[in-house]
Amino acid sequence: MIEIKNVRKAFGEKVVLHDVSFKMEAGKTNLIIGTSGSGKTVLMKIMIGLMSVDNGQVLYEGEDIVTMDEKELKLLRQSVGMLFQGSALFDSKTVEENVMFPLDMFTKDNYATKLKRVNEVLDRVNLKDANKKFPAEISGGMKKRVALARAVVQNPKYLFCDEPNSGLDPQTSLVIDKLIKEITTEFNITTVVNTHDMNTVMEYGDHIVYMYQGTKQWEGTNKDIIFSKDEKLNAFIFASEFLEKAKEMSMMEAEAALRSRSGQSYKD
Ligand SMILES: Nc1ncnc2c1ncn2[C@@H]1O[C@H](COP(=O)(O)OP(=O)(O)OP(=O)(O)O)[C@@H](O)[C@H]1O
């Protein structure tokens, strides 16, 4: 579990995070959502220890990373996997070499052991027979899967995904979301996803933190969102007519279910 407690961050006079607190639990897809400039990226960088805080704590299983030195942070980062926007693969390395990179960096395993692990994770993201291909030779969705394989190759306890669906079509996005969700549950990872994708929010939002102008405006699950009365959250989530309609329909269905449970007819 990762817990953020009373985190404040300012750049000069400008406060970009005001007293933010929340918990991200293991085995859950924890999402951070919010409009552009609301502080999601800064929050993510702080959670990974790439940016300092002015105030507050960032606790990994109760251990505050704010007070850790570089050596302790480096050790912690070995249990953290990261999936960046745009995949961030090395163009001059093959798929296999890209996925093996963290093992080359952080382990002393021999090649056969590393290759076995690489093949396991490539298999897990449904990417067999792509080992010798270069990033330029594969699709955007495949690149994301390679990047995900690389992010989990060291069996991380924590997984950070920054806009994992950026640049992908809706169907491929769903494949990536599903994989992230499955891997999170399967290996009981504390996964934190920074996303703008409403499909992800509705489908995989086990726990959602909505950021508004540097404050945590709302927190809940994808099911709670449907019934939320928070005007700022609603304006953000139901900005499209399609989602507004979906909300209305869900409300009607829920109402009908409640009425039938209490013995009333839906036509009442
Ligand atoms: N290094 C920095 N120096 C000064 N201001 C910064 C810095 N990094 C971020 N900010 C400011 O902090 C605020 C929050 O930025 P952040 O990148 O976290 O937003 P975001 O919610 O991730 O936006 P987006 O969805 O567009 O990526 C913005 O006003 C931004 O200009």
Image: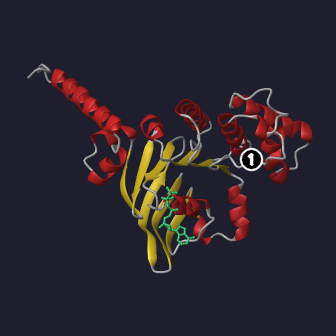
Residue 61, position in %: x, y?
57, 55
Q: Which residue type carries mark 1?
A: Leu
* Along the line of sight, the residue nearer the viewer: 36 or 227: 36
Residue 205 in which image quadrant: top left
Please indicate whether residue 244 sits to the left or right of residue 20 in the image. Answer: left
Q: Which residue is mark 1?
A: 89
Return the residue nearer the eye: 206 or 23: 206
- Give percent across and percent down for residue 102: 78, 49
Residue at 57%, 44% in the rendered image: 166
Its colouring scheme is: secondary structure
The reply, left or right, for residue 141 in relation to residue 62 is right
Question: Residue at image x 74%, y 42%?
Answer: 153
Q: Residue at x 54, y 29 (%)?
A: 171
- On screen, residue 259 versus residue 199, left or right, reads left
Q: Position of residue 78 (x, y in %)?
A: 72, 54
Badge 1, how many Cα within 10 Å: few under 14, some, many 20+? Answer: many
Residue 158 vs 5, above or below: the answer is above
Q: Which residue is most to the bottom?
A: 13
Which image quarter holds the C terminus?
top left
